[in-house]
Amino acid sequence: MRGPKQYMADRFPWLNLPDSIAAAFVLALIAVSLWPHSRLMVDLVFITAIPGSIAAIVWSLTFWQSARVQIGRLKLRYKAVRRIAGIAAMSCLPFLLLQQASIYLQGPNILRELPPEVADATAPYPDVEKWRIRVVFAIAHLEGDNGQQLEGRLRDALSNIDPRLHITPVILNSTIAVSGRPQGIAHLDALNSVTNVRVEALIWGGAGGAPRPAVGPLYETKFGSDSQFGAVYLPSDFKLPELPPDDLVKVVRLIVATQSAESMREWMFKFGDALEPIIRETRALADDPRRSGGWTADARARVNLAIGIASKISGVELKSQDSLKSAVTYLRRAQEDWTREHDPLEWAMAQLNLGAALNQLSELNLQLAPLHESKAAYKNALSVYQGRSDSLDSATVQFQLGRALEQIANHEAGNDSLRQAADYCRAAVKGFDVKFYPMSWAAAQAQLGSVLSLLADREDDADGYQNAIAAFREALKVYTKRSDPMLWADAQSQLAEALELLGAARSNFDDLKQSVAISRQVLDGFPRKWDRQRWAAAQAVLGNELLSLNDLQPNPSYPPEAAKAFRASLEEQSRDRDPIAWATLKVALGNALDEMGESNNESWCFEQAIQNYNDALEVFRPDRDQIQWARAKSDLGDALSGLGTRGPGVTYLKEAVDNYHQALTVLTKDKLPGDWKKTQNNLEIALDALHQRGWNGS
């Protein structure tokens, strides 16, 4: 009977062992070049790369005299070792080299396709109107839950939440034991128990480990790179309050509904007042001493925290100051039961959420005091996280501090807050590892760019704009038009605005043209119905770019195009909804009309510009919006001066001088040199015109 070897020899007499090995080697190389990302090829490259690298090192060492001596002491010939090592390296390393070459050649190539950022910009927006959202929460079998009664009640409670929140509860057919082992081990089991990446969070734990009548301990674990409920990473699981079953079910409903609402806000889905009935239901529990009197201090704090976070998110959705004030109240209640000494992480979590609620309240009531309280709360939280070397939560707080300080700077003439904001944003960028937390890292980069751009504008520093541009481009390495269209549009608009300011500062026409091109790409096909405020903001950026172009190379078509963009933006931005944004657009429209008056020598343009500036000054206040107020006063002076020089008398020119003087009380040479220089020059022009008409005033 012939064996396999004899059979092959008889069947293929021309085939020998060396040829077979060579053929297999060549076929393997071809496979690696064709499918460099396949699992089999990756494993093959990994297996051959290690011995190949070692062999290459040994081969190179044989050229070193000291290594030759050591080889001789092992009773080996270095030439033989060199030859064998060389053969091994030549046999193994080609797989790695060919795989990397194949990946490079199959990737983007500037000679045959557009660079990724250009291709992404010219691609159409995804059809967001067809987007649907479904937020899945899993419930594991609970340890000690006789007859799975509590599990069933939780599932039924989550099934009956308002359909506008799109919550789907599912049962996970496994139990994560909590008794008799460290919580960290149970946490790892929870992370590994869900293989479906569409699951938002998992509720797990036990029902019989808490003093009667409460049940617990129960935990909720979120998946992916998102923080836990409460916007923190530590503790790694959010512990649900230990409450009697009837109370627990209601609180869990609120926590789950809140997380779903937060996910919907991130993806620009509206949920209206869907949270309000659940908030009222839970507040009735917390405010009833007959119910809450028997709770532990920790349970009370967790319920108050949940109510506070839910009220904050609902308040932002409904633009309700009452909801945000309620959020502040309940978050402060949580701090009455959690102390920094005994519950540092929980206390810091409450401080972080308190800071966020105060920040949102300031955006609605336009008051500066809540912003300073917000800053203090963030700093309290940061001191805890930095004291525990928690770099991830520290980065989260530093990011929020950067935003709060930028908002404070909008109400101040000085730049100290902006410099601090820049430092915090840089620290946040360092704290987020882009490999594991790309979205947080990109958000920190975009926030850094925003702060640097504003600081450069205040200090008249062209280099600052370049640093801002670099930060926005870093963010755009993460944000893509297909997967994150709104964040991509924001970053692109901010990049365009920074380029426009840089071009204006350096009188560089190419930068201005590039900024206009980027803004037009953002607006091309933008789903206006999906996010009207973002569309309006992009229109405003385009209008400002056109005015900057006109300043550098006057063109009669630029100011009317800019005015058209600002009017389009005002169609979506009402005074009641966002008075500061509305007033800013009014000033911008006034600037466009003022430029039209200069180009066409038309008095009606100046008159309409004056009306728009006065509309804005009904909102801007010198005690609250110092810089915006002063710049509007300076611009109003320009329009009055333009109108006054084209007509008889000195009335308009005197009003222009008065407005310039008022503006210069804020636009000082040391704090805002660019604005000071512009206003001072225009003041001298108006005074010269007055003196030429015989005015002898001071």
Image (tube, rainbow, N blue to C red):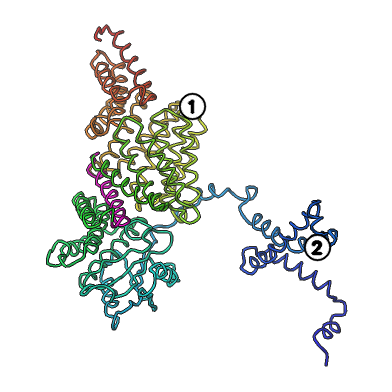
Q: Residues within 10 Å of mark 1 (few under 14, many from 20)?
A: some
Name the residue furthest right.
13
Name the residue furthest bottom.
1
Select label 1 or label 2 by which is in front.
2
In whole angstroms, how far apart are the C-alphas of marks 1 and 2? 73 Å
The amino acid type found where label 2 is placed reads Leu
Which mark, by number, is residue 419?
Answer: none
Above or below — where is 405 with respect to 526?
Answer: above
Q: Residues within 10 Å of mark 2 (few under 14, many from 20)?
A: few
- Majority secondary structure in the magenta region: helix
The amino acid type found where label 1 is placed reads Ser
User: Would residue 457 appear left or right of 332 to someone viewing this image?
Assistant: right
Tell me the residue that label 2 is attached to: 74
User: Would residue 171 appear left or right of 245 to someone viewing this image?
Assistant: right
User: Would residue 155 appear left or right of 119 to someone viewing this image?
Assistant: left
Question: Which range is magenta?
Answer: 342-368
Name the residue furthest front.
73
- Which quadrant of the figure contains the C terminus? top left
Q: Which badge, 1 or 2, comes first in the chain's sequence?
A: 2
From this viewpoint, is residue 318 visible? yes
Q: Quadrant of residue 645?
A: top left
Q: Position of residue 565 (x, y in %)?
A: 37, 38
Residue 300 versus residue 286: which sits nearer the camera? Answer: 300
Tell me the residue that label 1 is attached to: 507
**Residue drawn where x is 31% and y is 51% of the image:** 352
Above or below — where is 542 with respect to 222?
Answer: above
